[in-house]
Amino acid sequence: MYINLVRLRTVLDDREEEIIKENNNFIDDINNELTEEDIIIKENAPDAVCNIYFIETGGSEPHFVKMFDSIDKKEPVILLSNCKNNSLPATLEIKTYCSRRKYSAMMFVGKDPSHVAKTFKSFFHVYLAKKSLDNNNLGVIGEPSPWLIASIISKEDVKKRFSMNLIDISMDELVIEIDKKQMEYIPHHEDLKAKFKKADVLEEALYFYSALKRLVKKYNLQGLTIRCFDLLNKYHNTACLALALLNEEGITSACEGDISSLLTMHIVKALTNRPSFMANPSLIDMEKKQILFAHCTLPLNMVTSYKLLTHFESNEGIGIKGEMPLGEISVCKLALTKKSVYDESLALSGTIKENCSLPGYCRTQIMAEFSDTEFITFFKCDFANHCIITYGDIVDDFAAILSFYQMKFDEVE
């Protein structure tokens, strides 16, 4: 995988050959550190996935300005400095030039090639995750649920901000597919039948899954969200199991028509190559710095064990009560405010301390504990009602991928 190297320099004395040689060695040393990542930085690279601008000396700023109009503004401007020959101040000037024009600029700085390579590896992981999201199709089946009064975002904003496509699909079309009563291949089918004894309810829930799978294929969807309570009103059954199965197989699936949660889940999946748990913060213990997260759907490959119960609010259909392994988690959520998504979104790390079975809450329940700082951060962010939970600490990666989406919503036309 090639990264195209663009070199910018201004040399006022007779040291140009010396500077070129020194910087060639710098790039070679970085490449040696990147061999395991199958990444090569090279001038005039064929089929390069992006450019990196090596600011070799001071005075390079006018050269950058001349080529600025030809740079793909949908991608971050990647700058490299080895902190020699006034490279760093020039790089900082160029970064500010980009930022003031509302374009994201990433800067890799250091005299030590191994350090630069290490930070570049982390960046490139996030960069490829972002690239994998471009032009993804996300289905919105029905309108967002009426209680999501702070979680609405338009198709136009999603396209301009996140380069993803929202595909509107009517509930009527889903109902037509459900009423065909055609069963697709069902993962864990025998285990599901053993865990839920009401065969007719299970069968109908799996018709929901099969209908959604056909819509995924029809519209080439990489993810979806569904106004699931409409199914409860019509069928007295729920989409919880269907969404759990879809998430497990890599089709990002959110409930309640929640687009901001769907976007967050899809970004988290791109970063981790794993599904996530969409949950409500349901109980807060201020003294212990603990929060209970609960919901009735959970991907089956996120559990150590699970039961199939009824849906909590309705006591109908099927809800999943999963046991999640104790340990480190990240809690994330895009904040769709008029301010910067990068600054306003929620991203904090915590620890699952126990799985709970408290009355009065949704079926899957985890009690998570946070540091004082993280706990305070939770209250400072305006993220609406759902949170997205994934295993491990992805806070830095989540912040990094959001930095690609820095443009403010009040500038979206």
Image (spheres, rainbow, N blue to C red):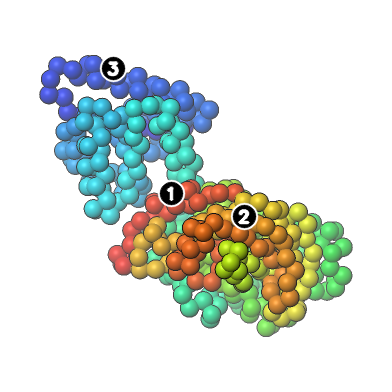
Q: Is residue 390 left or right of residue 320?
A: left
What residue is shown with label 2? 351
What residue is shown with label 1? 400
Instruction: Tell me residue 267's x, y (percent).
Output: 51, 55
Precedes in sequence: disc 1 or disc 3: 3
Distance of label 1 from label 2 (alpha carbons): 22 Å
Q: Nearer the viewer, residue 155 or 54?
A: 54
Disc 1 packing (10 Å; few <14; some 14–19; many ≥20): some
Q: Nearer the viewer, residue 362 or 336?
A: 362
- Of helix, strand and loop, which one carries label 1? helix
Q: Residue furthest left?
A: 12
Quadrant of the rendered structure where residue 47 is?
A: top left
Precedes in sequence: disc 1 or disc 2: 2
Q: Residue furthest front?
A: 287
Instruction: Tell me residue 384's x, y (percent).
Output: 50, 71
* Vertical placement of residue 186 versus 108, above or below: below
Instruction: Tell me residue 42's x, y (percent).
Output: 37, 27
* Label pair 3/2, CB-CB below 8 angstroms: no
Tell me the amino acid under the disc marked 3: Lys
* Label pair 1/2, CB-CB below 8 angstroms: no
Q: Nearer the viewer, mark 1 or mark 2?
A: 2
Tell me the amino acid under the disc marked 2: Thr
Precedes in sequence: disc 3 or disc 2: 3
What residue is shown with label 3? 21
Q: Who's the residue at 46% across and 30% down the image?
A: 39
